[in-house]
Image: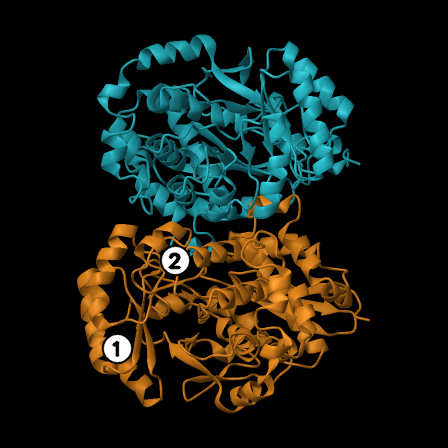
Chain colours: A cyan, B orange
Amino acid sequence: MWPSGQIFCLKDVRFPTSVEQLGSDAMHTDPDYSAAYVVLETDCNLRGFGLTFTLGKGTEIVVCAVKALAGLVVGKCLREIVSDFRGFYRLLSSDSQMRWLGPEKGVIHLATAAVLNAVWDLWARAEGKPLWKLLVDMDPKQIVSCIDFRYITDALTEEEALGEIGLNPKSQEGKQQREHQMLMEGYPAYTTSCAWIGYSDQLLQQLCTDALRSGWTKFKVKVGADLEDDVRRCRLIRETIGPNNTMMIDANQRWDVAEAIEWVSRLAEFKPLWIEEPTSPDDILGHATISKASLFILCHNRVMFKQFLQAAALQFVQIDACRLGSVNENLAVLLMAHKFKVPVCPHAGGVGLCELMQHLILFDYICVSVSLSNRMCEFVDHLHEHFTSPVVIQNACYMPPKDPGYSCEMFESSVRRHQFPDGDVWRLDMKK
Amino acid sequence: MWPSGQIFCLKDVRFPTSVEQLGSDAMHTDPDYSAAYVVLETDCNLRGFGLTFTLGKGTEIVVCAVKALAGLVVGKCLREIVSDFRGFYRLLSSDSQMRWLGPEKGVIHLATAAVLNAVWDLWARAEGKPLWKLLVDMDPKQIVSCIDFRYITDALTEEEALGEIGLNPKSQEGKQQREHQMLMEGYPAYTTSCAWIGYSDQLLQQLCTDALRSGWTKFKVKVGADLEDDVRRCRLIRETIGPNNTMMIDANQRWDVAEAIEWVSRLAEFKPLWIEEPTSPDDILGHATISKASLFILCHNRVMFKQFLQAAALQFVQIDACRLGSVNENLAVLLMAHKFKVPVCPHAGGVGLCELMQHLILFDYICVSVSLSNRMCEFVDHLHEHFTSPVVIQNACYMPPKDPGYSCEMFESSVRRHQFPDGDVWRLDMKK
């Protein structure tokens, strides 16, 4: 039914965010928010838009990897892909020559996400629905058929996923009600826009004050470069937002295990809800040692999440639309998190991540977790103007998108202008 | 003293090994052994040769990543690099924009290894020594100064590395004697050349018989595609090599945890010394569950090895000259393995891995482990003819290389002929 596709457009798109220290943290001091941006086209002119998020330099490597994966996608029919999405996921993630480059991690996995995000966008557009609604309306068996259970069956089998966790008829009760609730109230968000590590104290205070006025109640603070600085900044923010609002801290993998324990005890007086990425994202056992504090971790694939859950080495699961293998692998993690009774709070921000993540977390609430307790989705207020269906925030909540697709189509003019290195923004060296 | 360098040559070199099923296993059914091959040049005409090993498709992605890293190397002076090699390692592995693409895993880490391998080769050539001898003669403090201890200080601190593990004056006793022993007898090897998964029973038997005649006593068998096949193949090989020779099995990440336990118990009757990569290399806890069997694992970085050691989830450590961040990160793993009293048996084969690995394992024996018990280095007898200083095997032992450098310079004619896609081998489509 859906004719064979091609890659219509594949671009290295970069935004010079480092100029204003947007996105700066203890490990990433000067990110230029960027994306490998993919447009798939079918021969009936339907297009699917996908991206993976990067930090600037090296985006061309991910673009090169998308090109290498394209050979596995182009010429395939959408109907054929989605009727065996698990097989298609494995085709991309386990190509017998290319899996050496991962497997399922780093550049090749980021590229896989870009391609699969475009396929999901195409599917949702073909059905005329926003992606979250496509998922919500989908038969649970079909949901589960999109997940590759390889390497996670010791934590979650296909039968468990289907029968026990959120997707059985019983837990479908109240689904319509939750969908209606989301359409009316939206999904709660927290803001990371106020406290990048490169911001001055004055700017921090100003941005927090403004955000409070706009209805924000949950704030994330970047820490980890200098302990005394962090104490001062955390105190300032806690004083500004008051004792009843929520504060989280994020060290962006800066510490070793012992350092993390010391640093986190010093910052405990500011009562953070969680500590995000205290050390290497590969260090499951290290996190288990640190985790007297409440930890919040982003891993590179479902096998890592499985172990963090098994070892009780995190207290909040942080999924990502691009770091993980698209919707398929995020579904696996949502279901495992629910089995292990750990709340999911997505990573967003960057460029396009807010647009993508809202879909997955809406599905999580309506069909899986059915709870908002200790749950919220990250929000960063930058670069949304480049998207044709940008996120809508009302009263510090994500309002469910209504346009068909996965919300990551960029304006052609934005792509043209920010294309690296030929777009006007870079050619004219506006950054300097 | 050493003038600024440049990248003289950067090539995607591929050998059509899949034609004869060389290297075939349960997950990699048709590898074309390949390399991203780097030549650094200084302006006094000294050259450093480095590579990272890949399986064919996607090598161009690694080449693209080496190009991206080149900006951090070109123009640097060798003296400057090696006087703060830890800092240089971190410069490459933790670039604030590019670390998003890893960190320290996948394509970007493979590319880092290629670049650093070339730097180590350059250093050894500048000193007029083979790399293993450069390491053996090096002041222990300088050895330790090459290691990035970030994320492993909870298992091994710099002081421990220096004072407790193999590098202190006491353990230096007998060093000359061990060096002499290696020069006379070589370092014991095992062979993987006899039992690729794509080989027929007849070929298996023939190759094992030939290898026995050449003095081989340790044999690795690829398993994991089909249990009944494996039983038959393992029985055949055990019968051919007899009860007193050593057999190991390698599943190349094929199984889930429960599957691995079942499969491994079935194959136990053939008395394998170890089971290699039964499941995902990311699954520390999974391996800990399986590890009633004796496991042998290759991880993507020192943080993963740290945890496998802490969790006693492996019984043999498998280092790799290209999967890990070159000599620097391999040194960290050698020292951790010694602290945890686990023998190291390197991964080799592919193209160039034997040439590289022999240097590291010679250093391990002479300066760190000082033991040959349960230790051996993998050997695969393919593609050595493309190197200017190929490995020398005598009586199933690696004889220490004597030429200056890290032994991974290829003949220009080999590079030209196998360059992808323009070399004669590919242009003339000799593969088909």
Q: Which residue is mark 2?
A: B313
Q: Quadrant of the N terminus of chain A?
A: top left
Instruction: Name the one closer to the observer, A85 or A21.
Output: A21
Residue A41 falls left or right of residue B408: left
Badge 1 marks a residue whose secondary structure is helix
Residue B1 vertical position relative to residue A61 in the rendered view, above or below:
below
- Percent across and percent down for residue B122 are 68, 72
- Percent across and percent down for residue B51 are 57, 66
Q: Quadrant of the C terminus of chain A?
A: top right
Residue A256 falls left or right of residue A402: right
Counting residues from the start of the chain, the first of labels 2 and 1 encountered is 1
Badge 2 marks a residue whose secondary structure is loop
**Amino acid bearing label 1:** Leu
Q: Gap between marks 2 and 1, in whole Å?
A: 34 Å
Q: Mark 2 near mark 1, Cβ–Cβ under 8 Å?
A: no
Residue A153 vertical position relative to residue A403 in the rendered view, above or below:
below
Residue at 56% x, 83% y is B401
**Amino acid bearing label 2:** Ala
Q: Nearer the viewer, mark 2 or mark 1?
A: 2
Q: Which residue is mark 1?
A: B203
Residue at 19% x, 63% y is B266
Residue B379 falls left or right of residue B148: left
Instruction: Name the one closer to the observer, B187 or B354.
Output: B187
Residue B141 falls left or right of residue A248: right
Is any atom of residue A337 visible in this view? yes
Q: The residue marked by circle 1 belongs to what chain?
A: B
- In the displayed orientation, state which residue is furthest to the bottom: B184
